[in-house]
Amino acid sequence: MAAETATPGTVRAARSRRFDWREYVVYIGFVVLFAIFAITLSDDGFLNKTNLLNIARQSAIIAVMAVAMTFVISTAEIDLSVGSVAGLSSVTTAMVIGDVGLVGAIVVGLGTGLVCGAISGALTTVVRIPSFLVTLGMLGIAHGVAMWISDTAPQPISNETFTKIFGTATILGIPVLIFWMVAALIVGHVALRRTPFGRRVLATGGNESAAAFSGVNTRRIKFAVLLLSGAVAGLAGMLYAGRFQSGRFEWGEGDELSVIAAAILGGTSLFGGKGSVVGAVTGALLMGLINNGLILMGLEYSQQQIVRGAIIILAVALARR
Amino acid sequence: MADGPPRQDSGARVRAGAGEAAPVVRMRGVGKSFDGTTVLSGVDLDLRPGEVHGLMGENGAGKSTLMKILLGIYTPDAGEIEVAPDARIAMIFQEFSLVPTLTVAQNVFLDREARTRAGLIDDRETERRARALFEELEIDLDVTRPVSSLPTAYWQLTEIAKALSQDARVLVMDEPTSSLARAETENLFALIRRLRDRGIAIVYISHRMEEIFEIVDRVTVLRDGKLVITEDASELTLEATIEHIVGRSISDGFRWRPPKRAPGEPLLEVEGLTADPLNDVSFEVRAGEVLGVAGLLGSGRTELATTLFGVRRATAGTIRVHGQDRTIRRPHDAISAGLALVPEDRRVQGLVLAHSLRDNVLLPVLGTFTRRGMVQDRRGNDLVRRYVERLRIAAPSIQAPARLLSGGNQQKVVLAKWLATEPDVLIMDEPTAGVDIGAKVEIVEMIRELADAGNAILLFSSELPELLAVSDRLLLLRAGRVQRVLARAEIADDKDLHHMLQDTTTPAVA
């Protein structure tokens, strides 16, 4: 009705657009939970600077992967392999770093992710197997390869420059992982909102057919987002390797669910066409916040999982329209 | 009426136009408002058994609100509605409400299946009943086939059968022919006439004028939520009806005028284009000229449009734009060559419905609004506003999602999107499908203006009056081949053109 009452040719100032709180569930949830924990857990050290930085640090790797996942889901595809690709990349990086040095190790780590992403992307866009199945397969393959080449043993890393850059350093008292997260946030946000690539990603997910008719090479876009997701998973693997000073197939195991949950909590539509990088990072921080609060409350691991699951369902249910 | 005896409509055939027949539905002074906005006021509507009643009006005139009140989805604020006892009212939805994976019989009797003595579903008995029903309706259809394996025309027939199996005595059909080819439309009309002869009242909503006069017995026109007129169709002319609908005289809108200046150099030259079913198609379109393409279903109209634009690949042939040979493998190539395509289905191919009007318009021209890798939103907004003004697009804001706009305005957004690419050659495939008559006239006028401004326009349409209103030349397509190319002056009217299309004795031009 609204459209038909507008005068043709004129665009009225957006008519008192009511504040739609559903768009902001993840931010509201973050603030509300933060306030609750701040009040109830102040004696348990929740508000300590160390604790707050810990929350951000522990969420950082999930947040970095959630940025890339936002692009994938915005095209109405999915990448289930990010966790195990990260594990594989941590192993390959650790195994070569002694021989090839810092730069070589970074190339291998990113390359591992790129190869996995390229395979998933090609199978999805050229062979046209749904990305859900392709990346489910890739999840198993990457995990298996990581176990096989490392003989399931942790691969220690003694290169201190590497571990500092990717995990353990602090700059002005802030852990380096947080800088990685902020960098991913800024680059991802600008790329999605302000570049032609981001617009084409959203258009492809919003209506693939219309995007194709508009001259968008939708297959290339889908290939690109899966490649990107693979590369970022490779980076995440190096962050794990740096943080724990070793490569291990178990790093990142099960992360895909947290990463997807963070993106969806952040307002990205599983059906594509709508995505928010800021929301995804906030989603990752929200989950870190919940974990931290539940631990401080003294809940057991089993109980934490139940409460966390319930909060995620609640948040997504509230954000649905 | 309420305590009268139930009508027996199975025996005696009540013929339409028997004005004396007591109405099966009687609506008096119906009014409805939403949030203080009146969308209907004082509307009267009688539906008689055995009549096809055309309900007409622009989008927003109140047609669908009135029908939703009739179906009981909305409660009216004012007025009264009397429905004959036992008279069920059913609506045939535009978006079909069938389960594609189930068979025709399973769909018709969904949740009302025949049961065996054990209480299990008896598919064989259900199929027998469905078969009997389709036989009665004189529709030849295998009821054991899954709906998804049937052409969409049969989905609609299945919907109608489903409604009738529930003893509906009033059927509401909203744009029932929008996805049908001419032959399928004929079938549907034959069915509608049979239903009418069996005493069923049919409300027929359509924007297609020529259809209204072909099938409808009485016409009710709504405008701005008010009743304008209810009249026997035989008493109305096309012009008078359009005037009732839009509330102003537009008699010139559908009359062809010769172009203001002689056509210039050829902008698009196609030679020997072949891509199944197209076979050796050659033609040219000059600057300032509108070339209309007419053809029956299966003639390859849409295929020609999409092949030129690179959505489908040609197996042979050359395309020259501005005298230069162009290789077109994908839409991107076509856009760079200076072509634009307003596609057949605006909702599926034309727009990202969830995205804003602005993002839709800018999608094909993102590259030109990018500086140092960033999209220049402010410059883009200015461009979008210019087109909103020029094409008189009614929208609450350029940030409004495309799905909130009416069909006519959505189509203008698609047009704006392609004009923004500043094409030399504008290809339009069914540009007025599903838009109301006011917007239709506006779009037809715009096509003329664009040609006068020096564009070459290739117009594909199944609506012959519209083709004749703007085309300077007409290309008749049959079975993928060019049958003939005619100057507009060689064609008298749409009946004449219709005969030419049907005429299979003329050999195709080699």
Image (tube, coloured by chain):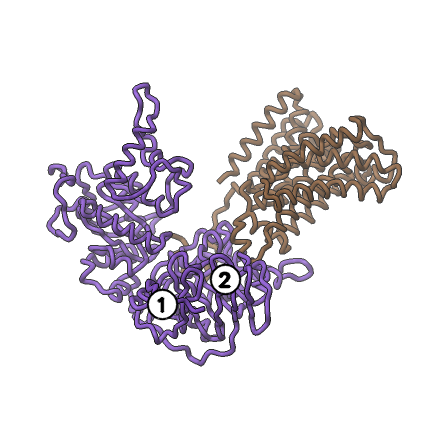
Chain colours: A brown, B purple
Q: Residue, x 23% and y 55% (percent of image)?
A: B216
Image coordinates for residue A214, horizontal then vertical, percent? 54, 57
- Say the numbered circle drawn on residue B340: none
Q: Residue, x 59% and y 24% (percent of image)?
A: A306
Quarter of the figure with residue B8: top left
Quadrant of the snapshot with the C terminus of chain B = bottom left
- Above or below, comparing residue B147 to residue A219 in the picture: above
For the residue marked with disc 1, what is the amino acid?
Thr
Which structural element holds mark 2? Answer: strand
- Judging from the image, mark 2 belongs to the subunit labelled B
Marks 2 and 1, how far apart at CA: 31 Å
Image coordinates for residue A237, horizontal then vertical, percent? 75, 36
Q: Is any part of residue B378 visible from this angle?
A: no
Closer to the camera: disc 2 or disc 1?
Answer: 1
- Judging from the image, mark 1 belongs to the subunit labelled B
In the figure, is residue A183 to the left or right of B92? right
- Above or below, comparing residue A125 to residue A97 in the picture: below
Which structural element holds mark 1? Answer: loop
Disc 2: which residue = B341
Disc 1: which residue = B506
